[in-house]
Amino acid sequence: MTADALADALRRGPFHVALRTAIEHRGLSLARLRAHLSRIEVSVAESTLSYWQRGLRHPDMPHALTAVRGLETVLGLPTDSLVVLIGPRQRGSRARKPSASFAELVVAGPTTRELLAQLGVDPERCNAGLELQMTHERVTIAADRTQGRIQTRLVSVAREPGIDRYVAVYHGEPGCDIERVRVTAGDGCRLGRVRRREICVAFELMFDRRLAEGDTVVLSYAVDDSSGLECPGYFRIFREPGGPFLLQLELPPADLPARCVQEVRTNDLRPPSISQDLYCDRGYIVSAYYSGVDRGIAGIALEWPQNPANPVVDPVP
């Protein structure tokens, strides 16, 4: 790659062509480039550099300004030679829908806002720095029809640098004892602060480092609710569109629900906009798969048969 070709790319752009040309001119691999950036305390994921030089992503200003200036330094380019090529986000980039508020989705929204505020989290921007790529949840239903353990695994990508936690919220059923709800951190995180009120618990899952833009984080956690209430099903809140969602319920073999229904709701007060019967497999597991989710509530509703231990007795006339 000649110096003239580099000068022409810096003059004409676009950004990804100029960046790719500069990298080729220096003869650096992306791994080496990232290492050089780290030495000047600029953190950028190798995947992000790859996306940028191929034009698959555009640096998000102003968050990426430090990274782009770092690239100029490492690649030996004139000051602002790449910065001036960033400009507005390229046409065709996926526009983000604004996140729905908790109050729009659940009755317990106001309580949730208070708990998040206690954690120092802006309720409107809760987890806004993470883009949800995939969600897998597995819920155990005990023999007495109560909800046992909820195991959650999430895959997210950092939209901006510096993210160091994921904030989760659990809403129990009306009448639950929220003090009996226990949270356990799993892979990729440790449990931070926990706040409880009424039927809600909000908690932090702390990462072992601050993420660079474009970093992928995989984390898991479990929630155990021993309130002893009959489980009417399980639903997850999505405040903005996300990737695939797989929900699995382990059912009690000796007392199966009369009906299992995959549902999507715009909030917890409205009837489902999507409703589809599900059937459990030979392992007594019922699964609902969503190839993608929009803002709202998605999950599985359960209808239980009359419990012989608590028969309904007709009143005596």
Image: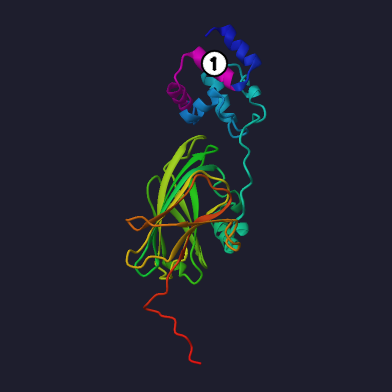
- Most foreground residue, 93 or 66: 93
- Is residue 89 on the magenta stretch? no
Task: Count all numbered tags in the image, as a single digit.
Answer: 1
Judging by the rendered image, the residue that carries numbered circle 1 is 22
> Does residue 25 belong to the magenta stretch?
yes
Q: In the displayed structure, would residue 191 be above or below residue 256? A: above
* Left or right of residue 11: residue 76: left
Depth check: 136 or 255 in front? 255
Residue 66 can be seen, yes or no = yes
Where does residue 127 sit, x and y in percent of width and height? 54, 47
Q: Position of residue 213 (x, y in %)?
A: 52, 35
At 66% from the left edge and 30% from the top edge, which residue is drawn? Answer: 91
Picture quarter containing residue 56? top right
Above or below — where is 199 with respect to 169? below
Where residue 276 sits: x, y (%)?
Answer: 50, 56
The answer to whether residue 236 is seen in the rendering is no
**Quadrant in the picture for residue 107:** bottom right
Q: Position of residue 270 (x, y in %)?
A: 61, 62
Name which residue type carries label 1.
Answer: Ala
